[in-house]
Amino acid sequence: MTLFIGGTAAALYWAFSEYSGFRNIWLLVCGAPVAVVVVAVLTLFTLYTRFGEPLSGIFNAIDSVSEGNLSVRVKEHNSDVFSELIKRFNKMVEELERADKQRRNLTADIAHELRTPLHIIQGNLEGVLDGVYEATPDHINNTLDETRLLARLVEDLQTLSLAETGQLPLHPTRFLLADLITDLTSSFSAQAKTQGVELLSQIDDITQELTADYDRLNQVLSNLISNALRHTPSGGKISLEAESIQVQERSVRIRVKDTGVGIAPENLPFIFDRFWRGEKSRTNRSNSGLGLAISKQLVLAHKGTIDVESEVGKGTTFTIEL
């Protein structure tokens, strides 16, 4: 068909070639559609390259995500229209993948944490029933300790869940920050002395007041001090410092500093994750691995911030601003 039309056009052109006016009109009539087709093809190609290709990649990625494939990423594109959209989409999918991985790990961690005390309780009770063990106070107390461990783990999980969803009730009161610091140092002084660790406190302004949930804030700092005691060897120091600041709406900065073993740089991003522990063997069953995660959520519930700085072999500093 194309050859027929082209041949006919060429024949007519040569037939009327002596008439220059007619020839020019004929060239215009035949050439205009070709030019329009060429321009249309170039325009469509440009539009596809600029809009169609990036949109196709995004739509395909959305379909993959809807099917449960969170490893998909949209190829980076140099389009000034979609480059930022693609970056944000990839970041969103990356966060979804990370959250899904955390959820899977959480299920495995909870099963691991519950399995050990349940096996001990079951073994002790079966041993008593089978006559292997006598129902002595020691066996009963050991079983009771495991039930307490389970109860604490369940309570910590509930506290963390409520805090993360913003449903944890807070009971703010007005109190002297110095009173809180004094209570904490008194509570941990005996343990610190037993371990050979010096526990210090420093308050810039003893009249500094704070409106917060006293018990929850006490829980946060108790978690941090307990963690510091667990990782500070004999002869080390732990200091609890408080000072007044003026940063946005925050007026108080509290630091818990220790001269302990420190935290490796590769572990710092994960220390506030649930069930994270520095010691991978998990031999210390008195530590549920939820303390720092709970501390962070309780601080966030107070509209505050918590950060950590650490250097291996020199110590760790947790900083809270409220």
Image: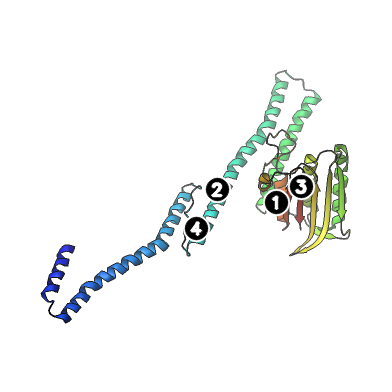
Q: Mark 3 points at which residue?
A: 316
Separation (CA) of disc 1 from disc 2? 22 Å
Q: Are marks 1 and 3 in contact (CB under 8 Å)?
A: no
* Quarter of the image that includes the N terminus: bottom left
Q: Name the residue under label 1.
A: 297
The image shows residue 69, relative to residue 27, as above or below, that is above
For disc 2, the neighbor class at 10 Å (few under 14, some 14 to 19, many from 20) is: some
Of the image marks 3 and 4, the number of the one nearer the N terminus: 4
Q: Where is residue 259 in the image (x, y as percent from the top left)?
A: 80, 45
Amino acid type shown at disc 4? Ile
Separation (CA) of disc 1 from disc 3? 20 Å
Disc number for residue 86: 4
Q: Name the residue under label 2.
A: 97
Which mark is nearer the camera, 2 or 3?
A: 3
Furthest residue toward front: 18
For disc 4, the neighbor class at 10 Å (few under 14, some 14 to 19, many from 20) is: many
Furthest residue toward top: 131
Question: Can the viewer see residue 42?
Answer: yes
Amino acid type shown at disc 1? Gln
Of the image marks 2 and 4, the number of the one nearer the N terminus: 4
Residue at the image position 78 percent from the left and 40 percent from the top: 230
* Quarter of the image that includes the C terminus: bottom right
